[in-house]
Amino acid sequence: MKFGAGLWCLQATATSPRHHSAAYRGLLEDARAIEAYGYESLWLSEHHFFYDGYSPALLPAAAAALQVTSTLRLGTGMMLMPLQDAERASTLAGVIAERYAGRLDVGLGLGYRDTEFDGKGVPRTERVARHREGMRLMTERVVPHGGTVWAGSATPKAVARAGARGQGILLSGANPLSLVRELAQAHRAGWEDAGRPGGARPTVAALRNVWMTDDPAEKAAALDWQRASYVLYAGLGWSVAARDSTPTMDFRRDADKAIADAVATTIAGPAGYVIDGLHEVADAGVDTVVLRVGLEGASSEAIRAMLGRMADQVVPAMEGVKAA
């Protein structure tokens, strides 16, 4: 099992105000620290027209973090491809992948907020076509330089298409393990049914809410940070449809239940407890865990300290563990 950290959204929220320059400067400091701990990747996230300055341009931020590191991979989780100029974004991504030895993982999503499509002047009826064109251009311009192109979705059909293309997927941290397992299986089936393009099974990565600590008070604080971070999702209007044994998670219509369900996915506690929880994640079909630590209210110092403990006590114990 491999490990990354995310999501860096570069926000300045009402409860955690800061100058935006501090957010971007902090990204560079965090990238250096995460690389020093030995993590494989750091992931950024994109939104538009939200009050807190949620990062609207991921590629310049990724390039800045790549500039101050030498082994760390930078991922976009997700770049909202229908809202981008596909020619411009793919050209820039190709240049970044070439300049930084292929350490760029471009995750592409469809987007879902009406405000963003309206603000960009993009009809939602065009989003699938724009996404496909962006995916094609990104693949042509990033992959030849050693970078990768990823898909993000919460539906079996969509992740199966990614598998059929030989592309990895990055799954939401709010997804319960039942949904993670279903999506991982659909992804693998899509790859196998397509004749196993590329020869090696593409990666299933999943954001997971994890906080390793022996301190009950810090555990309680981490759960509060998780809860606060999902309150922001209510403002963004995010939702996950019901799938088999997994109930709907709708931050628009029933925010309290959705927030509680998302927080309930958290693996928080001592090293042994976290290791057991991560084995369950691997059993669900996950190759790479992106630790969801960019939490509302959590200081950079607390995040770095926790990532350091994870690197010392948990990551070595998961070495060699493979997805089911």
Image (spheres, grey):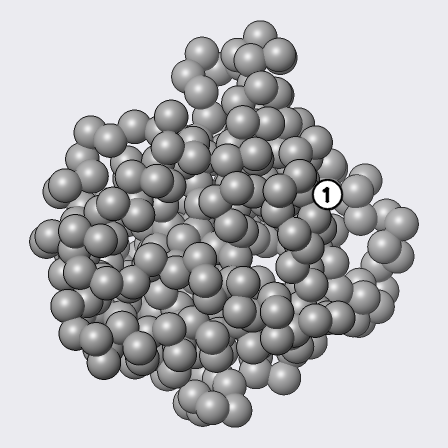
Residue to which mark 1 is pinned: 131
Q: Quadrant of residue 280?
A: top left
Residue type, numbered disc 1: His
Direction from residue 104 to residue 307 in the image, left or right: left
Residue found 56% across the figure and 77% down from its top: 231
Q: Nearer the viewer, residue 267 or 95?
A: 267
**Looking at the rendering, in which quadrant would you find the N terminus?**
top left
**Looking at the rendering, in which quadrant would you find the C terminus?**
top left
- Residue extending farthest left: 312
Q: Nearer the viewer, residue 137 or 217?
A: 217
Residue found 19% across the figure and 67% down from its top: 213
The reply to whether residue 210 is visible in this rendering is yes
Picture coordinates of residue 19, whole percent (x, y): 43, 89
Q: Quadrant of residue 100?
A: top left
Q: Nearer the viewer, residue 271 or 206?
A: 271
Residue found 39% across the figure and 68% down from its top: 294
Q: Is residue 266 above or below residue 103?
A: below
User: SS for tag 1?
Assistant: helix
Picture coordinates of residue 314, whole percent (x, y): 17, 49
The number of numbered discs placed on residues in the rendered structure image is 1
Residue found 46% across the figure and 66% down from its top: 263
Picture coordinates of residue 218, whole percent (x, y): 23, 77
> Could you classify mark 1 by the number of other residues whose Cα lies within 10 Å: few (under 14), some (14-19), or many (20 or more)?
many
- Residue extending farthest top: 195
Direction from residue 294 to residue 259 in the image, left or right: right
The reply to whether residue 23 is visible in this rendering is no
Picture coordinates of residue 305, whole percent (x, y): 17, 70
